[in-house]
Amino acid sequence: MLANDINPCVLAPNLMVDNDARLPAELRGLPVETPIFSAKPGEEVVFRVTQPDGRARQHSFRIGGHNYADMQLEDYVTPGNSIMTPGKAINVKPYGGAQPGYWQYRDGPSMFVNTGVWGLFKVQ
């Protein structure tokens, strides 16, 4: 899953800074906060994911470098990528536990990543 492996990437220093001109001046240039979860290599982890409400547009949940059974069904749809709809909740238990590295968890479509539907999973 190289597309989600940010380990070899060099990121711009202002990547996580919000300079949106629509923000009040005192909020521009501040770091963007995103949830960061951490674990030790091999540690058993569970991500509890829900989409309690919303319109009919589907989302998905995935963690770079990790596969898991969607709805606890082996090989259901695509291992490591759950379709999320209003009212659905899942417990994501990656196979083999946490894999070493810095990983992105996110919605599948890139348009949602650009709007902030993502976070970091640090395993060290």
Image (tube, grey):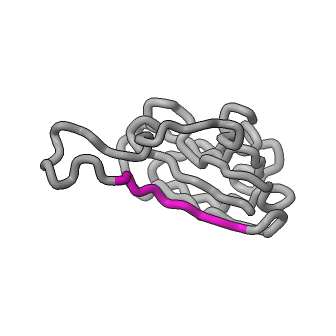
Residue at 56% from the left image edge and 36% from the top image edge:
108
Frontmost residue, 47 versus 99: 99
Which quadrant does the N terminus fall into?
A: top right
Specify whether residue 51 is painted magenta: no
Give percent across and percent down for residue 29.
Answer: 28, 47
Please state the total of marks drawn on the protein image: 0
Location of residue 77 (image quadrant): top right
Quadrant assignment, res 5: top right
* Depth order, front residue of 69/44: 44
Residue at point 41%, 44% (across, down)? 116
Q: Can you give x and y, in whole percent of width and height, for residue 112 in the image?
A: 44, 37
Q: Residue furthest left?
A: 24
Q: Quadrant of the image for the C terminus?
A: bottom right
On the rendered structure, is 95 left or right of 62? right
Q: Residue at x 70, y 43 (%)?
A: 7
> Could you tell me which residue is drawn at 14 percent across and 48 percent down?
25
Q: Is residue 112 above or below residue 102?
A: above
Q: Residue furthest front?
A: 13
Answer above or below: position of 123 versus 74: below
Magenta residues? 31-39
Q: Quadrant of residue 93?
A: bottom right
Q: Is residue 96 left or right of residue 47?
A: right
Instruction: Give left or right: position of 30 versus 58.
Output: left
